Image (cartoon, rainbow, N blue to C red):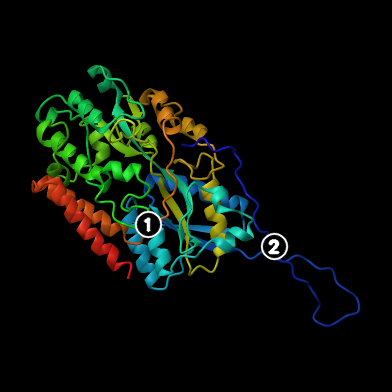
Amino acid sequence: MFKKKATLALSTAFLAMSLLSACTGGSESSSSKSEKPKEEEKVTIKYYNWDNEVMQASTAKYIEQFEKENPNINVEHVPLVPGNSLESLKKLDVLTASGEEIDVFMTPAIDHIYQRAAQGVIAPLDDLYKENKLKPEEEYLVNPIYKGKNYGILTNITTNFVLLNKDALDEAGLEVPKAGWTWDEFSEYAKKLTKGEGTEKQYGAYFHNWGLYANPIAQVHLKHPFMTEDGKTNFKDPSYEYFFNLRRQMEKTDKSIKPYADVIGAKLNYRTEFFNGDAAMLLSGTWMIGETGNVQNNPHDFKTAFAPVPVMKKGDKTDIFTGGHYLAIGESSKNKEAAFKFARFVSTNLTDARTEVPGWKNGEAQPLVKKWIEGKEELYDVDSLMYTLFDSQEALPASDVSITYAAQLDKILGDGFSQFILEDKSAKEVQQWMADEANKVIKENTK
């Protein structure tokens, strides 16, 4: 999916910011005095995100490098709620409403950009791109466009894949799957990988309580996780009935996944379930590449293999939805040019400061991944990782749908799945309820 990335260029021409002013004496004189350049005014911009202790180390490197190249711009780092992106955005919204000047901030998904663009609290980037002689469509894999204007700079991409305990696969005599394997085959793998009883039981797979796990077919293989391209709910898609019933089969009949009631009741951690060996397979995403080699935070000694996300049936396209983190510039910022320069620097940075796959088209990702796992190869099935990331699938084209109410639809999906799995309702009944509720939300937001 990263085949089109071509160069290792790390910088782009930016608009010169030097200001020259003439120095004259206190009174007029026939003798001209030499003009001296006036030092460029130093500015400070605030960068808001949700960095935890580990992530802060990466941000500190970005800022150090940026300030070295741009001595007249000071970056103040403000982690709002460490480790929690959604709570951080809530806190940021409070600061915005109170009149705080917001320079640049990170969002965890494109819909958060659309929501704030609709509210008028983030600045469109079209003039800044034009001033810097840049075309966003030539720079980034995805560009958030709301009402014809560009908002948000893609700093890294997130795609999904399946992590597999390679030691458990070998013990069960199973091969690492390739692109095009199906969810039915996934469920068969899960049955064969399930062993033991009670607290010693190893489940074949683990599904968390996010919307992704309620129906990954729609979440991963459609352009938009909640909407069709003609602006309707996708909750009527046949994949919902199929996957809901598959989940019930795996939990109730095969007993190859931990019960959903236990997942939400015990507030389980998906990383712990996989790295502790409680589950042999985990649907997750690119942020787990680094987590796999971090044995300090995730103690384990088995090798992890990687596989593309399964499809519904043989022959289905394997192209996948590309999400990511976006940097946005506050409409209230008095230093938008400096904020844009910083956002561009972060998004195009390919040094050791980067710990996630870039969304910049002109950045080669494969050497970065090799660097991340260097010295820890015993924890990775390297061939399957490289195949899954670079040779097995392509990124879906960006959706033309931009909505500000994705969180409401995500809640409907979660509530619907809970009704299905906890209250034993039929998939068709729940699917109809979800579609009806989604239509109400769509209608309310399109008046």
Q: Secondary structure at mark 2?
A: loop
* Residue where numbered disc 2 is placed: 18
Across and down, in percent, residue 126 comes to: 56, 61
Closer to the chain start, of discs 1 and 2, is: 2
207 to the left or right of 39? left
229 to the left or right of 28? left
Quick one: which residue is furthest to the right in this view?
Answer: 30
* Residue where numbered disc 1 is placed: 111
Across and down, in percent, residue 192 comes to: 19, 23
Along the viewing direction, whichever of 440 and 342 lies nearer the viewer: 440
Quadrant location of the C terminus?
A: bottom left
- Rendering quarter of residue 334: bottom right
| Crowding at mark 1 (Cα within 10 Å: few <14, some 14-19, many 20+) | some
The residue located at (34%, 52%) in the rendering is: 228
Q: Secondary structure at mark 1?
A: helix
Q: Is residue 64 visible?
A: no
72 to the left or right of 30? left
Against 344, residue 309 (above or below) is above
Q: Which mark lies nearer to you, 1 or 2? A: 1
Question: Quick check: marks 1 and 2 in contact, CB under 8 Å?
Answer: no
The residue located at (24%, 44%) in the rendering is: 238
Give residue 37's mark.
none
Q: Is residue 176 visible?
A: yes
Against 274, residue 60 (above or below) is below
Amino acid marked by disc 1: Asp
Across and down, in percent, residue 204 comes to: 20, 29
The residue located at (58%, 37%) in the rendering is: 6
Against 117, residue 8 (above or below) is above
| Crowding at mark 2 (Cα within 10 Å: few <14, some 14-19, many 20+) | few
Amino acid marked by disc 2: Ser
The residue located at (49%, 31%) in the rendering is: 371
